[in-house]
Amino acid sequence: MRFFLCLFTFNFLSALLNVVHSERSWYFRDDDIVFPGPTNAREVSLRRNLGLGANTNRIDHEEERPAAAPAKSRQGSAPNSRLCERKYGEYIRRIFPDESDTAKDANDAEFNGRSLAAPGEYPHMTALGFVSDNGQVDYKCGGSLISDRFVVTAAHCTNIVGEVPTKVRIGDLNLLEEEPHLEPQIHNIKKIHNHPDYKSTSYYNDIALLELETEIDLTEFARPIRLWTRPSTGPFTIAYAMGYGSTDFAKQRTNRLTDLNMTIISNEVCNRELPQIPETDRGIIDSQLCARDYALNRDTCQGDSGGPLQLNIRGRRRRNRLHYQLVGITSYGLYCRSGYPSIFTRVYSFLDWIESIVWKDE
């Protein structure tokens, strides 16, 4: 879920952004292993919703305290690589030892104005399950698999009105019905690691790691996403958000995986466009980032919180192959499709903290 502020009256004036949109892209080395992904640019839509409760988790809840911003890089074996990048390569080689073709075509079908994900298109996408007293599982948030045993999500998703997630589901497109040729996995959560500086009364440091009881069986339908290791993507970069959430404010969650493309905007522009609220008394800060859909006003919505904001970067030689990089975590926004930017937790700002927990023995 995701926080939606019910502001009863406000006038919104969009500033005209006279910016030259240059074709800026990052290319990967030819030997990089790629994720499956859409082979053509397409537009979609969704948004998230959160509800914060008290800080009393029923599972073992541990808080570590490294600095929020990465002070130094924990190097992997390759020159100029972080530990998280080296581990990503290890996971993918376990699944595709011969680096075989792994690209998947996008599903151009639409669902309530949003594009449906294709089987295997977003194999890192997870749904967080909350088990009720009668044993039913309600999937209220999303997350991203970043190792064979850890999922990264929004911290506010770890306690929603006193309830905590106990299960993670991965490799599925429809949470209500079985899809042919898919074998989703469900794993129990062993421990929740909220960022030590996260507070339920604030929208800052909205990031958590979910440690699973058992390792994910890594397959083409369930595998980690690579973490973005640069401080910025540059403004006006196209990124993708996704989740199983609602298509519009006050509607029920779809429980089907959809995505949308959004434009990343600078924090300066975001601070001008967003109204000031008590939960972000310092405005949008460096450990956050903003994105919005200027063309069609599509958005993330209730149930999309904790899911990824990612770059889908084409390979240099194989242009129909995509490299997925996690740049943000869906955090909060105002309603759905309100014309305001959505706010995400910037993954780069927490890399040292992530590595110190996920790969603490490396």
Image: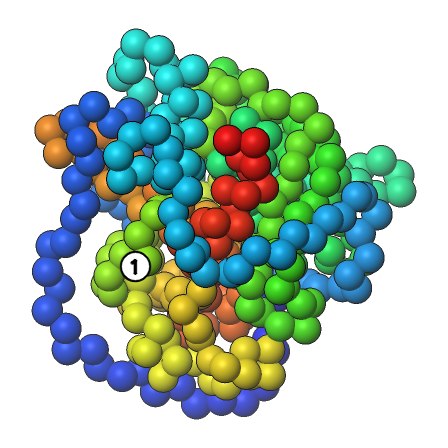
Point out residue 130 in the picture as x, y percentages from the top left corner: 74, 43
State whether residue 136 is above or below residue 335: above
Point out residue 114 in the picture as x, y percentages from the top left corner: 40, 49
Q: Decide: few, some or many residues near mark 1? Use Cα within 10 Å; few <14, some 14-19, many ≥20.
A: some
Name the residue beneath numbered marker 1.
Answer: 232
Residue visible at 29% across and 15% down in the picture: 99
> In terms of image quadrants, where is residue 103?
top left
Q: Is residue 232 left or right of residue 140?
A: left
Point out residue 159 in the picture as x, y percentages from the top left corner: 73, 56
Say which quadrant the N terminus sits in.
Answer: bottom right
Instruction: Give the number of callouts.
Output: 1
Residue visible at 62% across and 72% down in the picture: 202
Instruction: Name the kind of residue labelled 1 in the image.
Output: Ser
Residue visible at 64% across and 41% down in the picture: 210
Is 171 in front, or is 9? Answer: 171
Point out residue 232 in the picture as x, y percentages from the top left corner: 30, 59
Residue visible at 76% across and 48% down in the picture: 61
In this view of the protein, can residue 255 be seen by the observer?
no
State whether residue 332 is above or below residue 145: below
> In terms of image quadrants, where is residue 296?
bottom left
